[in-house]
Image (spheres, grey):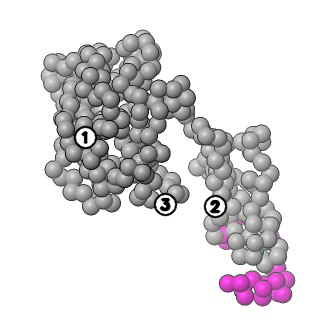
Amino acid sequence: MDFVILDLEWNGAYSRRLKKFMNEIIEFGAVRVDDRLRIKDTFEALIHPQVGKKISGKIKLLTSITNEDLEGGLQFMQAVGQFCKWAEGSVIMTWGTSDILALIENCRYFCGSGRIPFLSRYVDLQAYCEHLLCADNTKQQMGLSTAAGLLQIDDSGFDHHRALGDSLLTLRCFQKLYSSEKLEPFIQNAESDEFYRKMEFKTTTICDLNDPLVSKQDLSFHCIQCGHLAHRCGKWHLKNKSFHAAFYCRHCGYKFLGRVQFKLKYEGLKVKKTVQPYIEETAECKNQKSPPAKIEAKSSRNM
Ligand SMILES: [Zn+2]
């Protein structure tokens, strides 16, 4: 089984036909490796843009690709055709899913179908590497250079922000973390409708506590000192897409801020609850009387 690590460069371009901006792909870069991750071949293609006549200054600066370079490039569907032949029979891998979303968008625009012709098995290497590098509670998606740093890979020899250079750097990260057994569950069947639904699903955050998906239990907090159910002593506030409220434990007198966030993902609702120390000036429990001394004693014993 061969793996192909693909990376794309794109340019934000305004489409008159769609009446909106799209990410027009301007470069393909890929490396093909065998099942022991030895390099067999590389692929590079520049695309002559059709939607945006000129690439933005930012992209020019980032990639050092010039408009003149792209003049001699292939048409998007020609590049897809060549890549199909070159990558045949392989498992396609990208760092994160944004390149896959750009491919869906470009295929839909240039050939009317959002299906990616060369995709039958797919791995999101960012998800794989994150799974092996971080604990399960990762909040942010890890950038390629961050991962390379964590893996002590010297990335100075790679052609940064060029498709081939980035695919080779991704390969270096993959080589450091490769295990065929661990990779197995990350290989997705990319030929199903479900794959495309999942790719294009946009995670949203619920910002209304009256939403039927929000349960009473999601809004209750237990005291982290003694484990008893705490009482909310202030209104819920929405801040940075999560709800905050002050809580007070009648049992041990502990005060804290409860935070809850509701993310609607493809897999379903994800509720994230955290507890923060109570800060006197900002909280609303000021008018709460001190708890009875007996209970106070108990709480200090627990500490
Ligand atoms: Zn308590």
Residue 274 image label: 2
- In the image, is residue 181 above or below residue 100? below
Instruction: Kindly check if marks 2 and 1 are in contact, taking CB atoms under 8 A apart as contact.
Output: no
Return the residue at label 3: 135
Q: Amino acid at mark 2?
A: Thr
The span shown in magenta is: 278-303
The local secondary structure at tag 3 comes to loop
Q: CA distance from mark 1 to mark 3?
A: 28 Å
The local secondary structure at tag 2 comes to strand
Q: Residue at x 51, y 30 (%)?
A: 195
Q: Amino acid at mark 3?
A: Ala
Answer whether residue 279 is magenta in the image. yes
Q: Residue at x 43, y 52 (%)?
A: 182
The answer as to whether callout 2 falls within 8 Å of ligand 1 is no
Residue 226 image label: none
Q: In the figure, is residue 218 to the left or right of 239?
A: right
Q: Position of residue 272 (x, y in %)?
A: 63, 54
Q: Position of residue 58 (x, y in %)?
A: 27, 35
Q: Position of residue 73 (x, y in %)?
A: 19, 20
Decide: few, some or many residues near mark 1? Use Cα within 10 Å; few <14, some 14-19, many ≥20: some
* Mark in front: 1 vs 3: 1
- In the image, is residue 284 above or below residue 204? below
Return the residue at label 1: 33
